[in-house]
Image: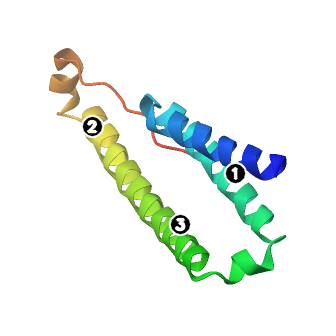
């Protein structure tokens, strides 16, 4: 039980870190830690066949999978927008206005 409690604690901490992350770089690291903690939960579930067969747990697995897909699509959309933005502020003639106006290059949201 101590190991399972540690797994849940790791998930809660990783989730809190992901919520409080500032900027894409820190958020990427926090999301990677959260994904690892959730993988640890799935490994622990393998030891409990009754839990694996539970409708509630199956629904949780489906929801987690769906949420991961939504996050992946949102991350891709963000990165596409940032790439377009970075290209536009560096292109002529926009760079004549964007530099003096204070527009700066933004970083992509990358997972490690």
Using residue 78 as the reference point, say whether residue 64 is left or right of it.
right
Q: Where is residue 39 in the image (x, y as percent from the top left)?
A: 71, 59
Sequence-wise first label, 3 or 1: 1
Sequence-wise first label, 3 or 2: 3
The residue wearing badge 2 is 91
Q: Position of residue 94 (x, y in %)?
A: 18, 33
Q: The residue tagged with tag 2: helix, strand or loop?
A: loop
The residue that appears at 45% across and 41% down in the rendered structure is: 108
Q: The residue tagged with tag 1: helix, strand or loop?
A: helix
The residue that appears at 20% across and 25% down in the rendered structure is: 98
Mark 2 is surrounded, within 10 Å at the Cα level, by few (under 14), some (14 to 19) or many (20 or more) other residues, namely: few
Q: Position of residue 2 (x, y in %)?
A: 82, 46
- 105 w.r.t. 4: above or below: above
Sequence-wise first label, 1 or 2: 1
The residue wearing badge 1 is 36
Separation of residues labelled 3 and 1 (CA atoms): 13 Å
């Amino acid at each position: 039980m101590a190991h399972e409690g540690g797994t849940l604690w790791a998930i809660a901490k990783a989730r809190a870190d992901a919520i409080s992350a500032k900027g894409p770089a820190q958020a990427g690291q926090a999301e990677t830690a959260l994904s690892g903690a959730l993988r640890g939960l799935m490994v622990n579930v393998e030891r409990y066949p009754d839990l694996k067969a539970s409708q509630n747990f199956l629904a949780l697995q489906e929801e987690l999978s769906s949420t991961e897909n939504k996050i992946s699509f949102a991350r891709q959309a963000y990165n596409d927008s940032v790439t377009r933005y970075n290209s536009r502020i560096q292109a002529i003639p926009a760079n004549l206005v964007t530099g003096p106006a204070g527009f700066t290059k933004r970083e992509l949201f990358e997972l490690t």
